[in-house]
Amino acid sequence: MYARLKTKIETVLFSDNLKSMVFRGGAWLATGSVSEQAARFARNMILARLLAPSAFGTMAIVASASSALQAFTDIGAREALIQNPKGSEPQYVNAAWWMAFGRALCTYTLVFLAAPFVARFYGNPELSALLRVVTLSVLFEGAISTRAYLAMREMKFSKWARIYHGGGICGVVITLVLSLFLRDVWTIVIGTCSESVARCLLSYVVCPYFPNFRWNWHALRDLSKFSRGLFGLSLLNLVFIRTDIFVLAKLFPAADLGLYTMAVFLVQVPAGFAITLMGQIIFPTFCKMQGDRERTNRVFLQITTAVMLLAMPMVVFMLFCGQPLLALAYGPAYAAAASALVLASAVALISMLNAQITGVFYASGAPQLHRRCVAVMAIAMVLLTYPLAKWLGVVGGQVAALIAVSAGFLFQAERIRHVTGFALNRYGKAVLLAIVPTSIVGAVCLAYRTIGSDSAIPALSVGLFGYLLAFGAAAWLILTRLDVSGKTASDLAQSSLAPSEVLVGSSEV
């Protein structure tokens, strides 16, 4: 047994097959992501006690307006470089840098000119200066060394983890230092810019590169073919993600918006990083499977099942423990936004499932399919947010988001049948497996609710205990039933598949 275990560990850690690269890369990115998220969570807990809720509401408006203007110029240079078979050639690397930096320069110019109009729309003159400063981060993000993106393409994720998550942690530290001297929204704005500056500097330290002026028009045209499928995607994404902020900012006071955004961000930030983490691994992994539909479907289903097993219990945990979690993390006033937190958890779950389909579309060279999905979600948000917010209050923003993301997921699930031939009834088997750990955390929390007290710390402790039990059950199911068609892990290991074809999804988890 020791010899077999040693052989398996050496195969996973030190071989050069796809599974090993995914496992090592996933370990690097997961470590970086967890470290950054822990730092961000600690930062938010401190800032929530130092700054007024209105500061977070103002920052939400600034971030939303900045993202809206950035969306007009997004061209997907990084994705185009990773997906293109010639992406490692020097002329393509140089073309991608100029595409990214040119886009960043256009974005900042647009934001600089539009900032006074945004401030006038919301009746807050301070927004103009805040917007112009926070969008400096776009310039630094656009100037990141293209060799860093090439490292992702080559699945050298350790370099990207040092750049991306290292820069994020530097920004968190700078924000906390600034909070000792500034007690307003400028603390968050300057801290946000510092993250981008740190990432840009780290990219040239870890992946040295100096762009030249010898443009290769053929490489630019080739990368632009993929980018055309992304045209308008960022704008549609922004409409879906930020419509609730834009609408609620006009309907409710900044303090109410601050409570809402902090509750939603408690879920959105880690969920966003989880989606980013999976995307950074899944996209290049699926790119290496181009043309092999059976293998793509198998890995896609394994990853989707693992996501359900781990994320569905978390939604139930938030349902029972959301209120004490907010009270303990940010203070008693934030507990009023528990309903928004629960709905945001459900939105995050469906978004994670949707992200797996998006990875398949991108790797297949068909990003326009995802663009149509986001268009459906954006239209739903525009139509539903205002009436639901008037009817339900601030929580209506997340009700609209849940309806919209569900519609988008159903749209993409239907389209993947035509791209890879994936049978949708296989989702049912994944859901049945996920019910096991989900029911465990639900039963533990429900039992405590009937006999326990309402104190935050005991309730959270019992909820975390229930989730740990559910996590153990999920881990056991992942190890024994990752292939939901009926094969166990040992069955797959003894099959005729190459090592790189077996259970790639388990490495990511």
Image (cartoon, rainbow, N blue to C red):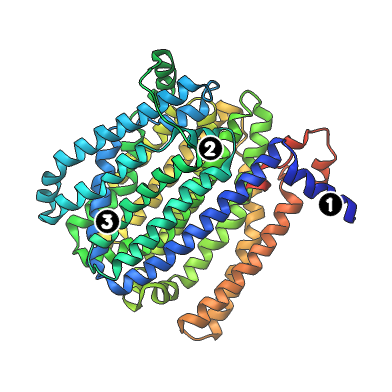
Q: Residue at x 46, y 80 (%)?
A: 456
> Dot 1, crowdedness within 10 Å: few (<14), some or many (≥20)?
few
The residue type indicated by label 2 comes to: Ile
Q: Quadrant of residue 169?
A: bottom left
Mark 1 element type: helix
The residue type indicated by label 3 comes to: Val
Q: Which mark is residue 138?
A: none
Q: Nearer the viewer, mark 2 or mark 1?
A: 1
Q: Residue at x 89, y 52 (%)?
A: 3
Q: Quadrant of residue 41?
A: bottom left
The residue type indicated by label 1 comes to: Lys
* Residue that mark 3 sits on: 189
334 with respect to 27 (left or right): left
Residue closer to the observer: 55 or 249: 55
Mark closer to the chain start, 2 or 3: 3
Position of residue 299 measured from the top left corner of the image (x, y, whole percent): 66, 38
* Residue that mark 1 sits on: 6
* Residue that mark 2 sits on: 357
Query: How far is disc 2 from disc 1 in space, using C-alphas?
Result: 35 Å
Q: Quadrant of residue 464?
A: bottom right
Q: Residue at x 20, y 40 (%)?
A: 111
Which quadrant is home to the N terminus? bottom right
Residue closer to the observer: 471 or 499: 499
Q: Is residue 75 visible?
A: yes
